Amino acid sequence: MTWSTADIPDLTGRRALVTGATSGIGYQTALELLKHGADVLIGARDAAKAEQAVQDLARAAGRAPAVVELDLADLGSVEKAAGEVIKTYDRLDILVNNAGVMAPPYRQTIDGFELQVGTNHLGHFALTGRLLPLLLKGSRVVTVSSFMHKTVSGISEQDFRQGPSGYRKWEAYAKSKLANLLFMLELDRRARAANASVLSAGSHPGYAATHLQAAGPELAGRQLQARVWSAATRLVAQSAAAGAWPSLYAATEPGLRPGSYVGPGFLEYRGTPKLVLPTRTAQDPELAERLWEWSVEATGVNPTPTA
């Protein structure tokens, strides 16, 4: 597949919300959407980082995004943020569920869930559900996963409330990314069953140079390890801009089939985007339905679309 950001169509008059857009892949996604005419909202929990991102994006794109205060590790914040968006705007054409945490030391969300599944999956599950009144007007929801989802063979409800004993940070990360794909595909199935005007798609960035790799060691107070991770990533990974290409393709490509999953073209590691396949586990509709039920119980939100 030959594709570049020049192939993104004119997005004038369309509105997008990108979570985790103050840096890395989310920032690059927001930048290209702005450059192609979209009105962009960036979800951010850190006010200072959000202010800097607005200034940088305005300088780079010639147009500034709006900021939505959003902490995906706090379901109360998710509810408040979605309420503000619904109150302020009459439509939302693109939602990019991008934000995430990777391999931190054991932490819990405000609501008592293991941090990675709580942020990467449950926060986005609840956000999508809270925004359904706008998304049902003909929107595209892109959920960002990872090739790391291939390293685990399942997920259980117990993973939501896992304690520090036996916690394995990379396994927990991979399970949260598996949950992202199970959610994306189940949202697609439910949207098509209801004949709802919501297109659910997924993406993954391959191996891209962002701050995400160093964030876990930093949370653990291991600054040397964080610097080593950052240096190694810069040497072997593709840029954050290239890492955003699959998300941008999934968010904007005309005629994209519902349920599509997009990743880098070269061994799903780097390069221009192409359609790729989730694992059999990620495509398991029974596991996806169970995950949906667990997630509804955990969040109090049900993102099932209606016609």
Image (cartoon, helix red, strand yellow):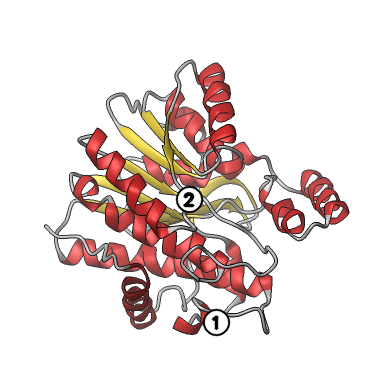
127 with respect to 5 (left or right): left
Which marked residue is nearer to the observer: mark 2 or mark 1?
Answer: 2
The label shown at residue 76 is: none
Residue at the image position 62 percent from the left and 67 percent from the top: 107
Residue carrying label 2? 71
Place residue 86 in its image quadrant. Answer: top left
Could you tell me if residue 256 is visible in this image?
no
Of 270 and 112, the residue lying toward us: 112
Counting from the top left corner in percent of width and height, residue 234 is at 78, 43
Name which of mark 2 and mark 1 comes first in the sequence.
Answer: 2
Give the x, y percent position of residue 118.
49, 66
For the question of whether residue 90 can be seen, the reply is yes
User: Crowding near pointer 1: few (<14 within 10 Å), some, many (20+)?
Assistant: few
Q: Quadrant of the C terminus?
A: bottom left
Q: Please state which amino acid type lies under the numbered disc 1.
A: Ser
Residue 8: which quarter of the image?
A: top left
Q: Which mark is residue 153?
A: 1
Q: Is residue 288 left or right of residue 55?
A: left
Mark 2 vs 1: CB contact within 8 A: no
Identify the residue at horizontal 30%, vertical 45% (top origin). 255
Q: Secondary structure at mark 2?
A: loop
Q: Position of residue 138 (x, y in %)?
A: 21, 45
Q: Position of residue 140 (x, y in %)?
A: 31, 47
